[in-house]
Image: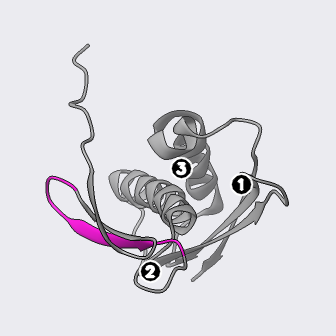
Amino acid sequence: MATKPPTVIDLTWTGHLAFAATTAKSAVVTDSAGEAGPSPVELLGVALAGCMSMDLAHILTRGRHSFRALRSRLVAERAADDPHRFTAVTLHFAVEGDVPRDPVERAIQLSRDKYCSVWHSLRQDIDLQVTFDITA
């Protein structure tokens, strides 16, 4: 099986606790205070929600389930002591369209169990709760 090429990210300090991060095709600013851009932990939340949202959209589309809109909201609890890591995450999906529940549940389970590389890169003792609703 062929391996994926490594992910390369370059950061350049821009002052205070902010950095310009560049990848092969894009750029973002990350700021400890979350002012010039998302903090690193916020970016981690974006990465997890984005990964599972993209999986859900891809799996539903491949299954020929049309939806008008897909939104997600991630709420992460953090440890009180350093390093203030995620201890629990709730991820809610809102799907708009005529999509049956079963394919949504299946897509979420596939993302969590098999496809979401971000989730599989995190500590597995994080309590991850995923919910969804569908609006026709």
Numbered label attached to residue 107: 3
Q: Which residues are magenta?
A: 23-32
> Which tag is nearer the camera, tag 1 or tag 3?
1
Q: Position of residue 91 (x, y in %)?
A: 66, 64
Marker count (numbered): 3
Q: Is residue 97 visible?
A: yes
Q: Earlier in the sequence, mark 1 or mark 3?
A: 1
Residue nearest the observer in this picture, 124 or 64: 124
Q: Which residue is mark 2?
A: 69
Q: Residue furthest front?
A: 16
Whether 112 is drawn above or below 94: the answer is: above
Q: Can you say which quadrant of the picture contains the C terminus?
A: bottom right
Q: Residues within 10 Å of mark 1 (few under 14, many from 20)?
A: many
Residue of label 1:
86
Q: Amino acid at mark 3?
A: Ala
> Residue 15 at x, y = what percent?
35, 76
Question: The disc labelled 1 sits on which kind of residue?
Answer: Phe
Question: Who's the residue at 52% across and 33% down the image?
Answer: 114
